[in-house]
Amino acid sequence: MFNKVLIANRGEIALRVMRTCREMGVRTAAVYSDADRTAPHVLAADEAYHIGGSQARDSYLVGERIIQTALNCGAEAIHPGYGFLAENGDFAEAVEAAGIAFIGPPAASIRAMGSKTEARRIMSEAGVPVVPGDKSGIDDHKAALKSADAIGYPVLIKAAKGGGGKGMRIVHTPNELPAAFDGARRESLSAFGSDEIYLERFIEGPRHIEIQVLADKHGNCIHLYERECSVQRRHQKVIEEAPSPALVDHPEIREKMGNTAVAAARACDYENAGTVEFLFDPASNDFYFLEMNTRLQVEHPVTELVTGFDLVHEQLLIASGQQMSIRQEDVKHRGHAIECRLYAEDPANGFLPDAGTVTSLVRPEGPWVRVDSGVETGSEIGVFYDPLVAKLIVWGIDREAAIRRMHRALGEYRVTGLTTNIGFNRWVMENPRFISGNFDTRFIEQEFSPEVLTSESREIELTAAIAAALWEQKKRSVPTVDGARPSSNGNLNAWKQTGRLQAMR
């Protein structure tokens, strides 16, 4: 096992990796930008090294500087987390060339799966079902129109080198295609440095279901079953759960999907942790390969809670050349887990991100509640990085219990200083369609509007914000309104009238 690991990331994922390293007796080295000088992940690491300016392109995306830092501090391995350089084949190759272990898949696997067209080709040849569409990129309107006619409308325009919903457009008629094609190319070039585009059939009302896989250097490859990721905004996941309610009554489909994911991993000579994503058509019970994420997923905690395995622990074992500690027959689902991504954003205003200082923070507690966060009171959520406040994950004996627990935990989560989507997540937990389990990737588009965040839910958030501020004042023994301490139930109206609430916002 390694003696020291450098974590080439920030925030909650850096802290998440550090905790497992500490349990395994492995020292950790953090890297940080100007904006992150006092960030929690910097303070938690055994060692920390400055690598550049606040912009990611000046720090977390400078692979050469990160590798040199690892060499200078004696780190034997680099864990990339997710985002930044995690799925950069050139970086993975450079890490290995420097004599440092990369805690992730081989560069060739990253490159193959990083190109959506190449991934589709590899999967087709391996017998993995793919959505009908192009086998290579297209670069002009004429080719796009010809492809769309062959596939059949509606079609989905996608970036060949990207993900996360960027460079993606749905086209229903030939007249819409040229403008959508040009827009997708521009967005893809800006986000991924490549304007390669391809088309595939748009499946109406699919569910987004992904399979967690693990593979080691000794030929072992297993799956840890599925995660449901259909609650999305702008093609980006916001709530995930395991197991999928769509597969609860279809164990044969779950097993087939898991085995197909293993076949997909073997087809690209995969090693370490990865995720094979599928589109599932509930009308036909067919599923199609969507893409493979060659890294640890943001939503990996739900798999950990329902299987009992630490995925980062397995990543470290595999990267150090050992066999993974899990066999396929060891993997069982136990209960139900749900994860909500808590962002600094305004759901009532198109989910626009917010920025500011977290003036107070109270996290939920209780049995089977997990909070993965890199944000504390006083933390700045700025414009340089993803506005993730935390991942809130709960476990329940069944889905109904997990939903109730999540609703309760969200009600206890109190953040002041900026706008968050906590109220939106509570609304989802109350939504009859979500509770029924009968939803698809159009859920937010079809169900949500700013009006559903009623005055009652806003009052709950207001009360929570005030309670958080009172709690912070109590800890610091600062006098409250008129020098008096609040009663046990607080005096909401008095605080509303003081004008102090505006400052808390």
Image (tube, rainbow, N blue to C red):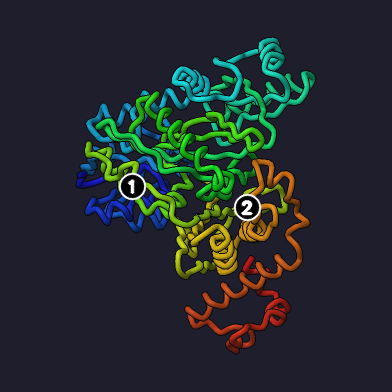
Mark 1 or mark 2, which is nearer to you? 1
Residue sitting nearer the eye, 167 or 206: 206
Q: Report which residue position mark 2 lands on.
A: 345
Is residue 243 depicted above or below 83 in this figure?
below
**What residue lies at 29% left-to-right and 48% top-to-bottom?**
29
Residue 418 image label: none
Report x, y in % for residue 173.
78, 22
Name the quadrant containing residue 451.
bottom right
Q: Earlier in the sequence, mark 1 or mark 2?
A: 1
Q: Report which residue position mark 1 lands on.
A: 330
**What residue lies at 48% left-to-right and 79% top-to-bottom?**
476
Is residue 190 depicted above or below 411 in this figure?
above
Is residue 196 depicted above or below 300 in this figure?
above
Which quadrant: the N terminus? top left
Q: Horizontal placement of 223 versus 288: left or right?
A: left
**What residue lies at 30% left-to-right and 48% top-to-bottom?**
313
Q: Tell me if label 1 and label 2 are in contact, CB under 8 Å.
A: no
**What residue lies at 59% left-to-right and 41% top-to-bottom?**
236
Amino acid at pointer 1:
Asp
Q: Horizontal placement of 78 versus 459: left or right?
A: left
Secondary structure at badge 1 equals helix
Tell me the crowding category of disc 1: few under 14, some 14 to 19, or many 20 or more residues within 10 angstroms, Cα based: few
Name the quadrant containing residue 159.
top right
Residue sitting nearer the eye, 407 or 51: 407
Amino acid at pointer 2:
Glu
Report x, y in % for residue 457.
70, 65
Name the quadrant containing residue 480.
bottom right
Marks counted in the figure total 2
Q: Horizontal placement of 354 versus 44: left or right?
A: right
